[in-house]
Image (cartoon, coloured by chain):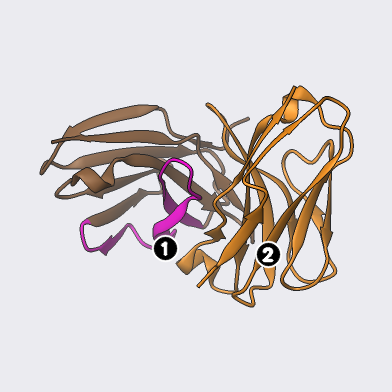
Chain colours: A brown, B orange
């Protein structure tokens, strides 16, 4: 029973364009959502988070949007750069533990 | 600034062998976690420790044991390895307010059980 789902295993985007990564969840008790980025042979690194009381959080080129009624969040990267090529995981929490999605591999095409 | 250090980085075990994965953090974090990453499955929580002296099961604890040796160290033990435990294992730590700052992960241990 996957409580956090990333339905797109992969995504390719032209350099300079917008990358949009999507995530859906089923547990309405989740109250905080995070995005992580992972390069090969490295651990995941924290990117950006959003509380369930907000619908948008922005940090530089990265913006996370939360639609609670649809139980959906998305990560926008603008403009996309070659260094953004990585696997992106969304994660959700209803207590001190995080539940992760399956990941989306983002490839930025030069 | 080491952060979270995992050893070993790679390991090959035969079915039935035992081993301990080591994890240490130098950020004075209270909470520590063990996850495994498998293709198509994302990161799944094995065990966690909210503070020194406490441990709790996560989503996939069967076949594993853990020890929170002190505030810095959190080890994961496989008593009798099985091919289904072939995976990449990540240790992580966090402090109060982690929901804002996220977990800090180690670089992982790639384990193959043959």
Q: Secondary structure at mark 2?
A: strand
* Magenta residues (range): A32-61
- Cα distance in 3D space between marks 1 and 2: 34 Å
Tally the numbered discs.
2
Where residue B11 sits, quadrant-wise, is: top right
* Residue at 31 percent of width and 47 percent of height: A75
Q: Residue at (33%, 57%) from the top-left corner?
A: A55
Q: How many other residues sit within 10 Å of disc 1, few (<14), some (14-19) or many (≥20)?
A: few
Q: Position of residue B68 (x, y in %)?
A: 81, 63
Residue at the extreme left of the image, as rendered:
A16
Q: Is residue B18 magenta?
A: no
Q: Which residue is mark 2?
A: B24
Residue in the image at 43% along x and 40% along y: A40
Q: Determine the chain carrying the residue at label 1.
A: A
Q: In the displayed image of the protein, which residue is found farthest to the bottom? A: B28
Magenta stretch mostly in which secondary structure? Answer: strand
Q: Secondary structure at mark 1?
A: loop
Q: Considering depth in this image, is B78 or A45 the residue closer to the camera?
A: B78
Subunit of label 2: B
B53 is higher (above) or lower (below) than B106: below
Q: Which residue is mark 1?
A: A53
């Amino acid at each position: 029973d996957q409580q956090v789902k990333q339905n797109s295993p992969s995504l390719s985007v032209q350099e300079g364009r917008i990358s949009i990564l999507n995530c859906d969840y089923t547990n309405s008790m989740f109250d905080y959502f995070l995005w992580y980025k992972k390069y090969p042979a490295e651990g995941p690194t924290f990117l950006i988070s959003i509380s369930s009381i907000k619908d948008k959080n922005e940090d530089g080129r990265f913006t996370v949007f939360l639609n609670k009624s649809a139980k959906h969040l998305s990560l926008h990267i603008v403009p996309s750069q070659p260094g953004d090529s990585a696997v992106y995981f969304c994660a959700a929490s209803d207590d001190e533990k995080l539940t992760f999605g399956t990941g989306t591999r983002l490839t930025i095409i030069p | 600034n080491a952060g979270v250090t995992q050893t070993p980085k790679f390991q090959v075990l035969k079915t039935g062998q035992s081993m301990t994965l080591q994890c240490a953090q130098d950020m004075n974090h209270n909470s520590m976690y063990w996850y495994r990453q498998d293709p198509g499955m994302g990161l799944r929580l094995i065990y966690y420790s909210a503070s020194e002296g406490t441990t709790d099961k996560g989503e996939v604890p069967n076949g594993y044991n853990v020890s929170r040796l002190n505030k810095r160290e959190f080890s994961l033990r496989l008593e009798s390895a099985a091919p289904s435990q072939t995976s990449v294992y990540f240790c992580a730590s966090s402090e109060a307010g982690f929901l804002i700052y996220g977990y800090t992960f180690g670089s992982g241990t790639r384990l193959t059980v043959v």
